[in-house]
Image (tube, rainbow, N blue to C red):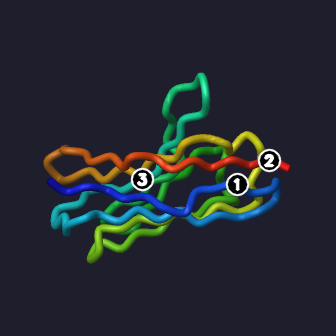
Amino acid sequence: QVQLVESGGGLVQPGGSLRLSCTASGRIFDVSVMGWYRQAPGKGRELVASITSDGTTNYADSVKGRFTISGDNAKTAVYLQMDSLKAEDTAVYFCRVVRMTGFAYWGQGTQVTVSS
């Protein structure tokens, strides 16, 4: 069973940057879309950014201009560069990979805390 492994979370001051990485333990050949979600305490999980297999990206309004998603289909890896971080970006971040069949894999989550 393929697993998604995330890394790159941590504690950062407001205005700082972090880069999240998500890599599959095995190659997934029929990826449709990869993305990052987040869940803050007491809130539901929300889409942060996504990238399709042909490179089309989509961002939540709250992160446009600050976050950049990129992907490597050959490695089944997805990255999230987060700049100009704000306190409201604090959340657990999850990566998700969806196959053409609709089956979705989720990562275990990585904590991002923005605080001075």
Q: Determine the secondary structure under disc 1.
A: strand
Labelled pair 3, 2 in contact (Cβ < 8 Å) = no
Residue with the mark numbered 1: 11
Q: Earlier in the sequence, mark 3 or mark 1?
A: 1
Instruction: State the image quarter where residue 87 is shown.
Output: top right
Tell me the kind of residue under disc 1: Leu
Position above or below: 48 against 13: above
Position above or below: 85 against 26: above
Residue with the mark numbered 2: 115
The x, y position of residue 15, in whole percent, is 82, 59
Q: Nearer the viewer, residue 95 or 57?
A: 95
Left/right placement of residue 7 relative to residue 1 reads right
Q: State the residue at coordinates (23%, 60%).
A: 31
The x, y position of residue 66, in whole percent, is 69, 59
Q: Nearer the viewer, residue 99 or 111?
A: 111
Labelled pair 1, 2 in contact (Cβ < 8 Å) = yes
Q: Residues within 10 Å of mark 3 (few under 14, many from 20)?
A: many
Q: Determine the secondary structure under disc 2.
A: loop
Q: Residues within 10 Å of mark 1 (few under 14, many from 20)?
A: some
Residue with the mark numbered 3: 35
Labelled pair 3, 1 in contact (Cβ < 8 Å) = no
Q: Earlier in the sequence, mark 3 or mark 2?
A: 3
Tell me the kind of residue under disc 3: Gly
Left/right placement of residue 99 relative to residue 71 reads left
Q: Residues within 10 Å of mark 2 (few under 14, many from 20)?
A: some
Question: How far, Cα to Cα, is label 1 from label 2?
Answer: 7 Å
Farthest bottom residue in view: 74
Question: How far, Cα to Cα, is label 3 from label 1?
Answer: 22 Å
Q: State the residue at coordinates (58%, 45%).
A: 60
The x, y position of residue 54, in whole percent, is 33, 68
